[in-house]
């Protein structure tokens, strides 16, 4: 941070110093006549403009203001009065315009940031300022600080001022554009001094010297033939203002031409340096890269078809990838090296015709290796190919494929065995369930007969025991029926059809409501339920279990309310059935969909613990999901999803 601050102070100091030099230089501006015009060259403006173009508009303004350069109109043309402020503001705009363009040139190479295009814009602004603003301001004279000022200016004088200003600014910009390439100027502004910049001073000085020499010879010959005196003293004695003007103009011209030449030379040398660095990097990459690299030259038949390729060059990586040395292939045709045609000739011909890059795999019979190749057009008659030896990868891939095939066979075999065992287990469970129901029905029937025929003769304790036997038998029969229902839902095939699920809910609700006529149970649909693609019988079985739970757990409510609704999320319907019953603790929600899992005792609410498991099994067969939410004494909500059918 401290170094940055010091560097900024340095910039400010140099900006102010060069601004002061520019201010002093304006008092010693040379003048020359051109087409009957007396044009002065304000060379002092070079210094603040150097600052603006090198460091940007901010430092340029510091040089013009704190360096006092901007005040020169008040000293050079004091009789202009208020109009001096126009010249002052015009100078500020000129500095800011070039400073801003200089900053943008570091970020973009767009044409309208070019220094001479920007100067063209500045010239247009000069015309506008001096043609429209300057005459109006000068009419406000005299100012308080000076009485003898002009308050009228002729149009032809304004035209002369505009011409002088444009010429003056152009010369300043051209010289600044030249000076910025001189090494000592670049060091002053702490710019990088490239190797090519060291030649700039010699080039510019040489061209200026040639201009001086050319001018001196012409003037000497002119004076010698005009005055008949060939002495040097005669030449120096008879020099007039016109000769000095010519010398000055040619000096400026030489400096501008020298600047252009220096810029061109620097650009060319920098380009050559970049090319050399690029060549070194390319050669280093070419030699050190692990990938193989080949440069092919096509060999054509008389009909224009490619019949072979010739090895032009290969890198050391190719020798490692292929096992062939560069000496064994360089300059030879493919067929000459491998004694077989190249299988990729069509690809190479397409690349040369279209210029598109191609990537492909190839196999070389001679080396027994697989390669991943990236081929591209290098020249009109050259193809570059970068290749990787992927033989280990291909072998590993083949081994993996073989293992996958073996694994698939094992999985199919084990799946068949498991499916057979599962079918046997289901058959066994179905058979056992039926076999268990027969003796249980007999026990329940005999118990009922005893109570009906001998109930009055039995004492109270015996009567209660027989009644318990009958109830236990009924519970066991219901449990077996539920198990059969669950088993059937798991293995039953589905006959899918469009089912109006809202009608199914209403139908099941009415059936359950008829079994408990004394209860107040209300069903509410939040929105119209859609038709779904489902098995009509299995779906009804799931809805019966859902609504049966709602009826059961709202038994203790004076007014039971069952709310049903749905929403569409992505490609599925999410249905919910909410009741205002007993609810449950969400900490135990994970157990509810397991077989025989209950959160209430049989004394509180009857049930087998299989209903929710059956619901989940049926919904899963339809490609859906199930979950449940609830709160103790605030009811429960069963959620299930079914796929959206777009038919």
Image (tube, rainbow, N blue to C red):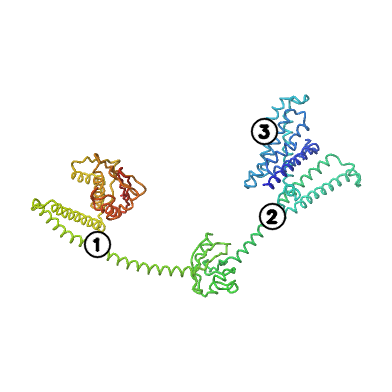
Asked whether the viewer can see residue 312, the reply is: no
Q: Which secondary structure lies at badge 2?
A: helix
Is disc 3 placed on a helix, strand or loop?
helix
Residue 16 image offset from top left, x and y in percent:
74, 40
Q: Using the image as rendered, state which of residue 517 and residue 503 is in the foreground.
A: 517
Could you say which disc has been placed on residue 281 in the image? none
Q: Which residue is mark 1?
A: 426
In the image, 290 versus 558, the foreground residue is: 558
Where is 256 relative to 276, above or below?
above
Looking at the image, is mark 3 or mark 2 earlier in the sequence?
A: 3
Upstream in sequence: badge 1 or badge 3 = 3
In the image, residue 65 lies at what x, y percent?
72, 36
Which-is-in-front pick, marks 1 and 3?
A: 1
Camera-nearest residue between 617 and 227: 617
**Residue 24 in view:** yes
Residue of label 3: 128
Separation (CA) of disc 3 from disc 2:
39 Å
Residue nearer the viewer, 304 or 236 = 236
- Dividing the picture into quadrants, the one containing residue 527 is top left
Name the mark nearer the viewer: 2 or 1: 1
In-image side of 597 versus 119 (left or right): left
Asked whether disc 1 touches disc 3, contact meaning CB atoms under 8 Å apart, the reply is no
Spatial CA distance of label 2 from label 1 is: 89 Å
- Residue 542 location, x and y as percent? 26, 51
Mark 3: few/some/many CA within 10 Å (<14, 14-19, 20+): few
Label 1: which secondary element:
helix
Cβ–Cβ under 8 Å for marks 3 and 2: no
Quickly name the residue at label 2: 268
Q: Is residue 554 left or right of residue 120?
A: left
């Amino acid at each position: 941070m401290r170094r940055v601050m010091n560097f900024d102070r340095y910039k400010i100091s140099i900006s102010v110093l060069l601004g002061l030099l520019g201010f002093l230089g304006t008092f010693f501006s040379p003048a020359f006549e051109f087409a009957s015009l007396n044009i002065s060259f304000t060379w002092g403006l070079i210094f603040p403009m150097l600052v603006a173009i090198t460091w940007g508009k901010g430092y340029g303004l510091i040089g013009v203001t704190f360096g006092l350069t901007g005040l020169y109109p008040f000293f050079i043309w004091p009789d202009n009065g208020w109009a001096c402020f126009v010249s002052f503001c015009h100078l500020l705009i000129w500095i800011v315009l070039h400073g801003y363009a200089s900053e943008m040139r570091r970020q973009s190479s767009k044409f309208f940031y070019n220094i001479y295009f920007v100067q063209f814009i500045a010239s247009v602004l000069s015309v506008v300022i001096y043609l429209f603003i300057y005459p109006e301001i000068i009419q406000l004279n005299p100012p308080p600080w000076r009485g003898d000022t002009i308050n009228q200016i002729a149009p032809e004088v304004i035209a002369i001022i505009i011409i002088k200003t444009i010429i003056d600014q152009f010369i300043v910009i051209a010289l600044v554009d030249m000076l910025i390439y001189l090494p000592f100027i670049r060091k002053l502004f702490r710019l990088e001094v490239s190797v090519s910049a060291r030649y700039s001073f010699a080039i510019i000085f040489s061209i200026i010297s040639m201009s001086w020499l050319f001018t001196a010879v012409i003037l000497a010959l002119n004076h010698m033939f005009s005055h008949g005196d060939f002495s040097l003293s005669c030449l120096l004695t008879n020099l007039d203002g016109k000769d000095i003007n010519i010398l000055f103009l040619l000096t400026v011209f030489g400096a501008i031409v020298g600047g252009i030449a220096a810029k061109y030379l620097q650009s060319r040398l920098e380009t050559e340096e970049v090319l050399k660095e690029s060549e070194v990097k390319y050669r280093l990459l070419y030699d050190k890269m692990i990938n193989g690299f080949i440069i092919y030259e096509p060999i054509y038949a008389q009909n224009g078809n490619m019949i072979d390729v010739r090895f032009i060059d290969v890198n050391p990586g190719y020798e490692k990838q292929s096992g062939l040395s560069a000496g064994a292939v360089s300059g030879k045709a493919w067929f000459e090296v491998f004694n077989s045609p190249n299988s990729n000739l069509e690809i190479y011909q397409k690349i040369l015709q279209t210029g598109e890059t191609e990537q492909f795999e190839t196999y070389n019979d001679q080396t027994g290796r697989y390669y991943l190749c990236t081929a591209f057009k290098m020249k009109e008659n050259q193809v570059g190919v970068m290749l990787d030896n992927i033989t280990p990868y291909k072998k590993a891939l083949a081994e993996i494929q073989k293992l996958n095939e073996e694994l698939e066979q094992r999985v199919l075999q084990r799946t068949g065995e498991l499916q057979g065992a599962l079918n046997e287990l289901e058959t066994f469970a179905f058979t056992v369930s039926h076999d268990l129901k027969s003796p249980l029905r007999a026990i329940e029937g005999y118990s009922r007969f005893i109570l009906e025929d001998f109930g009055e003769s039995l004492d109270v304790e015996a009567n209660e025991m027989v009644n318990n036997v009958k109830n236990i038998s009924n519970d066991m029969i219901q449990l077996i029926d539920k198990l059969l229902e669950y088993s059937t839902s798991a293995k039953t095939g589905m006959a899918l059809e469009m089912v109006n699920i809202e009608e199914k809910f209403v139908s099941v609700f009415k059936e359950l409501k008829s079994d408990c006529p004394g209860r107040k149970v209300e069903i509410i649909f939040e929105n119209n339920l859609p038709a779904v693609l489902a098995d009509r019988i299995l779906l009804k079985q799931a809805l019966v279990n859902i609504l049966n739970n709602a009826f059961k757990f709202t038994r203790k409510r004076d007014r039971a309310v069952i709310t049903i609704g749905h929403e569409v999320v992505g490609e599925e319907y999410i249905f919910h059935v909410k009741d205002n019953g007993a609810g449950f603790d969400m900490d135990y929600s994970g157990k509810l969909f397991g077989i025989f899992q209950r959160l209430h005792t049989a004394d509180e609410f009857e049930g087998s613990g299989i209903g929710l498991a059956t619901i989940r099994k049926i919904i899963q067969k339809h490609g859906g999901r199930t979950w449940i939410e609830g709160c103790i004494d605030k009811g429960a909500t069963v959620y299930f999803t079914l796929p959206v059918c777009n038919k």
